């Protein structure tokens, strides 16, 4: 269900393209005002290094960190394992508004900018391609080429055999001793990846108090020789990191090897910055949670919503939905879609936008705002989850460049999918050990990593760098009064954008 209707989403952005108590894995943080961030990701209006504004911002960062460390006596609650050299995630508009992270694989190590997808299982990379995208990031005169994985050039790579327990599609094998092929078809029309399975090292760093050492576990992933559909037009052009429940997914492999507990978390900041932590099953008192609905054949991160509250209007409408980071927006079937969109429409105090033939917005409920408007009052959307905890949707709207805002919800013919836009403002815990989904309000900068920055362990060069902490508040999950509306600042929905250079090569 990952990448659902991504072809439709890519048409929306076509003008930018014309596209068990053990260790845990985490993402380190560097400051948001670094030159690589401003250069590669094209972020404007940020303080220049050395200016008064720069030092004010950095001093604020220090106060936040010091306050937290004094509060807990400077103790480190848990050991951490982290990707290196950069461990942030970014929502990149040019690549389908999905969250991406840099991973380092193989010997010698190479980096890959992969989309993070809880709606699929397999981790795959473009590899010995007969049909895939060759390209990279372009900003001004700086161009960073994407890498293509070559299993023959990595001394630690080996093919997965058809008789391996990790070969999930043995019917595709020509012989039991041959190499295990794979083929994954995504729900987005004509979008697929195929090739064969390999094992190779994923480069991590282990934190042991004041010291660090490298950890290089073997993981299984797809050597993607042929990509089709949206993978050739900008979606996940450099690979996809499946985070589902199957045995072949990286969280499952790490847990089976005893490196982490069987859980991970992802954080989605409202400016497009995020974090991912493998092994995180933090059950803090201020965290909401709800159980997964387990399917015997193919389990997903499926939960139950028991009540929908929009603008103070309560509807006892029960539905099952999948939390899928590989889907940018939220898709609801007819009953839930009508309940949310029509109630939202009747409560918002803005003029409905009249769609023209030139509009390429896929959303049905859009509204006009004035050119100088800086805030907008919108009805609250709250989902009451099975178990009774409330999930408040922080920012359900997105802004078009033509003074139009839209409720970023789309109608689905079958599945209900909670996409990334409904996860914004939260740290989401996918606790596969206890089979629960957890959530806590976060801006992602306060998710403090205690890892030292030690570049000597960096195994490969990466194109992306991270950003800097700000203060956030925590969610209370007890009995609460839900306001009928709240005020949002008017700003583009996604802050991280890049210009891209894509060359389709078929050989």
Image (cartoon, rainbow, N blue to C red):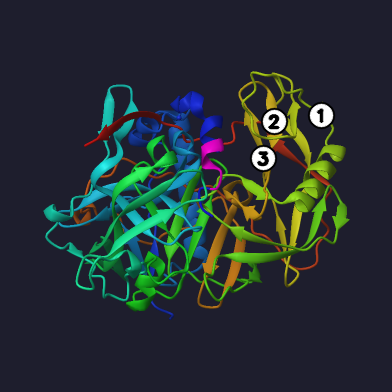
Q: Is residue 23 visible?
A: no
Q: Work out how far the residue at label 1 is from the one at label 2, CA to CA, in angstroms.
A: 10 Å
Count neighbours of disc 2 (C-alpha within 10 A) and say few if under 14, some if 14 to 19, many if 20 or more.
many
Q: Quadrant of the C terminus?
A: top left
**In the rendering, at what x and y percent does residue 56 appear?**
48, 37
Residue lying at 20% horizontally and 64% vertically, measured from the top left: 159
Picture residue at 52% right of the left edge, 38% below the top: 7
- Residue with the most extreme front position: 174
Highlighted range, magenta: 4-8
Counting from the top left corner in percent of width and height, residue 24 is at: 39, 69
Nearer-the-camera pick, 220 or 216: 220
Of the two numbered discs 3 and 1 on the same chain, state the one appearing first in sequence.
1
Residue 405: mark: 2
Mark 1 highlights which residue? 350
Residue in the picture at 66% in, 70% down: 290
Which secondary structure lies at badge 1?
loop
In the rendered structure, the answer to whether residue 163 lies left or right of residue 479 reads left
Classed neighbour count for the residue bearing mark 1: other residues with Cα under 10 Å, few (<14), some (14–19), many (≥20): some
- Label drawn at residue 408: 3
Badge 2 marks a residue whose secondary structure is strand
Does the magenta portion include 6? yes
Instruction: Tell which circle, 1 or 2, labels the residue nearer the N-terminal end.
Output: 1
Marks 1,2: beta carbons within 8 A: yes
Disc 2 from disc 3: Cα separation: 9 Å
Does the magenta segment cover residue 262?
no
């Amino acid at each position: 269900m990952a990448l659902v209707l991504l072809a439709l989403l890519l048409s929306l952005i076509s003008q930018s393209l014309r596209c068990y108590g053990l260790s845990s894995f985490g993402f380190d943080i560097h400051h948001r005002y670094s030159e690589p961030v401003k250069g590669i990701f094209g972020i404007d209006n940020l303080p220049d290094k050395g200016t008064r504004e720069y030092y004010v911002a950095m001093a604020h960062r220090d106060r936040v960190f010091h306050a937290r460390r004094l509060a807990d006596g400077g103790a480190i609650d848990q050991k951490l394992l982290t990707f290196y050299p950069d461990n942030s995630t970014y929502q990149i508009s040019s690549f389908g508004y999905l969250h991406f992270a840099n991973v380092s694989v193989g010997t010698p190590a190479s980096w890959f900018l992969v989309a993070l997808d809880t709606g699929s299982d397999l981790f795959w990379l473009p590899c010995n391609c007969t049909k895939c995208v060759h390209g990279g990031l372009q900003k001004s005169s700086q161009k960073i080429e994407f890498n293509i994985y070559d299993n023959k050039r990595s001394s630690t790579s080996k093919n997965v055999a058809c008789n391996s327990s990790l070969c999930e599609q043995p019917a595709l094998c020509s012989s039991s001793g041959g190499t295990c092929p794979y083929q994954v078809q995504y729900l987005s029309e004509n979008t697929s990846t195929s090739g064969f399975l390999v094992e190779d090292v994923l480069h991590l760093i282990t934190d042991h108090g004041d010291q660090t050492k490298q950890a290089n576990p073997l993981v299984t992933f797809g050597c993607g020789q042929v990509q089709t559909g949206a993978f050739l037009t900008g979606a996940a052009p450099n690979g996809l990191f499946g985070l589902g429940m199957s045995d072949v997914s990286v969280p499952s492999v790490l847990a089976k090897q005893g490196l982490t507990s069987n859980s991970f978390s992802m954080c989605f900041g409202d400016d497009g910055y995020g974090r991912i932590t493998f092994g995180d099953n933090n059950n803090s008192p201020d965290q909401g949670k709800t159980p997964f609905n387990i399917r015997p054949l193919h389990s997903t991160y499926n939960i139950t919503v028991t009540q929908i509250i929009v603008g103070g209007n309560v509807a006892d409408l029960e539905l099952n939905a999948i939390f899928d980071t590989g889907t940018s927006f939220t898709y609801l079937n007819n009953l839930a879609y009508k309940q949310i969109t029509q109630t939202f429409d009747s409560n918002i105090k803005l003029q409905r936008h009249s769609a023209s033939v030139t509009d390429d917005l896929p959303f049905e409920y859009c509204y006009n705002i004035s050119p100088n408007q800086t805030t907008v009052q919108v009805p609250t959307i709250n989902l009451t989850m099975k178990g009774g905890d409330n999930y408040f949707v922080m920012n359900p709207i997105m802004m078009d460049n033509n003074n139009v805002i839209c409720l970023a919800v789309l109608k689905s013919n079958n599945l209900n999918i909670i996409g990334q836009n409904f996860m914004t403002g939260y740290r989401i815990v996918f606790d596969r050990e206890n089979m629960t989904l957890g959530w806590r309000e976060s801006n992602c900068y306060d998710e403090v990593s205690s890892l030292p920055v030690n570049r000597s362990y960096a195994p490969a060069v990466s194109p992306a760098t991270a950003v800097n902490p700000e203060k956030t508040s925590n969610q209370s999950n007890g009995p609460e009064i839900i306001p009928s509306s709240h005020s949002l600042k008017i700003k583009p929905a996604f802050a991280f954008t890049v210009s891209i250079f894509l060359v389709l090569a078929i050989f």
